[in-house]
Amino acid sequence: MLNKEKAADIFARIRRFSSADEVEVIFNSSRFALTRFANNIIHQNVEEENSIVSIRTNFGGRTARATANQFDDESLQRAVVASENLARVQAADPDLLAMPTPVEANSEDRAADKSVRATRFFEETAAITPGDRAAVVKGIVAVAAKHRLTTAGIYSSSESEEGIFNSRGLAHWHQQTLAEVSITMLADDSSGWQKSNSPDVSQLDPGRLAETAAQKAVQSAHPREIAPGKYVVILEPAAVLDIVGFIFWDFSGVAILDQRSFLNDRIGTQLFGENINICDDAAHPLQAGSPFDGEGMRRQPVTLVENGVVKRVVYARATAQKMKHSEYAAKVGAIQATGHGFPLPNEAGEMPMNIVFAVPENPRSVEEMIASTERGVLVTRLWYIREVDPYEKIVTGMTRDGTFLVENGKIQCGLRNFRFNQNLISMLSNVEAMGSPVRASGEESFDMVVPAMKVREFNFTEATKF
Amino acid sequence: MKTAAQLALDTASGRGVTYADARVVSIRNRSLSAKNGRVGHASESESLGIGVRVIAEGAWGFAASADLSRAAVEAAAARAVEIARASARVKVEDIRLAPEPAAVAEWTTPYKVDPFTTSVEQNIDLLLKVDAEMRAVAGVTLAESGMNFQREESWFVSSEGADIHQTKYSTGAGYTAYAFAGGEIQKRSYPNSFGGQWQNRGYELVEEMKLVENARRVAEEAVALHHADQCPEGTQTIILDGSQLGLQIHESIGHPIELDRVLGMEANFAGTSFLTIEKLGNLRYGSELVNVVADARQEHGPGLGTFAYDDEGVAAQSTPIITNGRFTGYLSSRETAHTIGGARSGGTLRAEGWNRLPMIRMTNVSILPGEKPLSLEQLIAATDDGIYMETNKSWSIDDKRYNFQFGCEIAWEIKKGKRVRMLKNPSYSGITTEFWNSMDAICSRDEWRLWGTPNCGKGQPQQVVGTGHGASPARFRNIRVGSAYS
């Protein structure tokens, strides 16, 4: 594994090898292990260690990147030459900026650093062994056996180091751990699922997750088929994050400049319900990830949606400069670099990836949402979500692993799974109740701090055969 | 490289394993793009490392390291054994591997032009020419194009004596024109979405694609879609172009035939399959015209699933998957072959790189062309009332691979054998077996193309590999159309 001192030494060697005007190096180093189980046995069990050095060179408006995972002089020199050769042959890009200095990157915000350090790296997580993981899996299998179910899932752990150095003096480093459990419980014609992750393994409770997943599998046995149509749905937090994740690619300055965002001509308007408030905050205690972006700029907290009104989007440095001089400048709210850029060069620009939904005025538990529902559908998990219409933001996908009919305030039975085609603007305008936001993890979108939601007129268009 | 792999085997063997293999893999990649008249990104990458897979106490362990020093390789092998012993704490029975001759072989993708010998200037110049053609069309608001080359060299050795050195090249290129106007975003891609066309070939693939020649037409279609009528909702006859049919095969045949899915090994993430084992040889999967193979051999074509040996040393094969409409085969591995009574693996175990465990993946899962000569235009001429759809835009299918919905970039209404009007936002949906049983015509060999899907995700941690899908345009009856906008 690399550390900041080793990285600084490698960066110094790379600078000696390079003849570019400017040099930036991104380091990623990780040890990752994952124990996978199915049919109540461990069937795959892996561990890997890798370190990557990614070199960007600048020559007067020309830039390119080369990446390698070997650190001998020959390999580093080859990567430097590859980056320089790719950069030199291009025409100069007038929008390309000089690399940020530590002052511009707001490197000295010690309060934010302290908050991030306290919530991102835990020795206990880094120390998890194959034997520890097997013991946890054995416990999950025991829960399955108790309920006469079959279980499948993963228990993973990782520690990672990442950093960015540039020739203008910027030098950031970040350490992260993460432990994750995902559990499916299968019965003959039903299933249940739960997933959770945290930088701090002590925050995970695999036994509780296994019991909840098992109860969902048992409770949804012998599912009924009901006609597709518009229903009140109660989406558990993982279902919320997987579907709403599809809007955040568009909260990007480049997406507006490219006119590929559903926010084209809509920033500043009442797009969602007044109860929707969303920010991006890398330092939030339930968030994970580094506090700096792909150029080394500190990630700033940004209010994206306030009382249903889209206030602004996020910006990499060059995007902000370009937007200020564009025809859209008067229509997009505040324009400034927010520390959300991807590593350069890239086409996508930036994206908010530390999404936090605000605590609603009157948070309701899922149980309270069920109790207040005359007829609706409780959804545990969504699956294979894809965008159908980029401007109306219609997405399609399936329910999965625990879909229930709610009638007269109670769960009545399991349901066969539905296909939905749902306009996300409508969905976030039809939220009747929300829970307290939690850190949630799914499969279709990145992790977020999101609430459960009760949504009216959710559009199920077809049912499947199970 | 082979020395490192052999050292890993020796280390694992000294620790009491019953089986071990080691793969040293070196990958080089070049990725270039253009966007709205400028270079979008320009990057190269190299990745080198070793993955060691062992069976100890009847259970699997795998460890990978980028460090090929003697100490690091020995440590990785020892770690794989430690992990296998941990796996053995939660097992029911020992792993069984189907027998396989220990191959000693050398193989390289046939190619005419090593893509890495082409100059970056040449590559960028082509992308910018394509870009200029697209932006010459009024109404185009975003033009994106890209080009990717990969060279993957691997050294595989096993405790059974296998010793295989393979070098695979792949190339991909394509572009998309977007048009935003009046509260609507439309796009057209060439020659396919997902970055264009991808094959295991050299730069000659790029030269054959006529990228510049087609750019203006494709961009004009993106703009014209704004003036097209909405695809109607209802039950229709549809004709799918070969690239869309390739993705239909991928999702509703390729994934459900993965034997690990069938056996529940993917239940937590990718899902299971409706194709339970008792259906083998018994299920009427499609109409008599539906003949599908999984073929990794070079003679099938230069698909992204073409190789000489898979990542556990099994020779490339052709497996009949659907024969005259009947379900006849799965994708299998040495570990899973016995569950379907197979004496040998189907040779489909593949890994994304050195740091990932090989798992059952599609190779080239292709529908065979019709035997009677039939061009696309002849098929359209023989269709009284229907919709012809082209180029995938959205795709979704449930976790047992039954209910699917696809959207395409563009469609044309067919009346009395002629295209009468362009339609926007076409989509269709259905149930897998009902859909394939409704196929009543498929075009012949001259319309057949081996398409590449470069972004197939599976596994935990997720692995992305490329798969090949040969297809020619085909016609389907009584298909639900337009529900995506209902």
Image: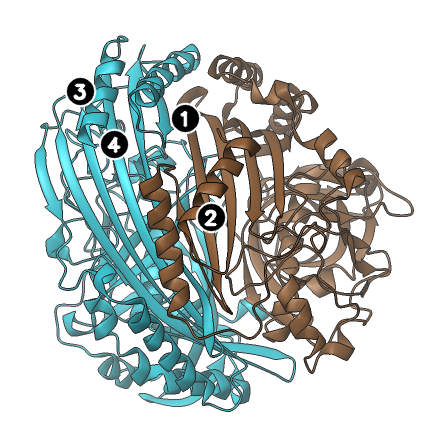
Q: Are marks 1 and 4 on the same chain?
A: no
Q: Quick one: label 3, few (<14), some, or many (20+) residues within 10 Å?
A: some
Q: Residue at x 57, y 56 (%)?
A: A342
Front tag of 4 and 2: 2
Label drawn at residue A46: 1
Query: In the figure, is residue B449 to the left or right of B145?
Result: left
Q: Chain of mark 1?
A: A
| Residue kind at label 4, given as amino acid type | Arg
Label drawn at residue B108: none
Q: Taking the image as drawn, is residue A461 in sight?
A: yes
Whole-angstrom CA distance, mark 4 to mark 2, is 33 Å
Q: Are marks 2 and 1 on the same chain?
A: yes
Among the chains pictured, the one given cyan colouring is: B
Q: Are marks 2 and 3 on the same chain?
A: no
Whole-angstrom CA distance, mark 1 to mark 4, is 15 Å
| Residue kind at label 2, given as amino acid type | Arg
- Nearer to us in this view, B315 or B14: B14
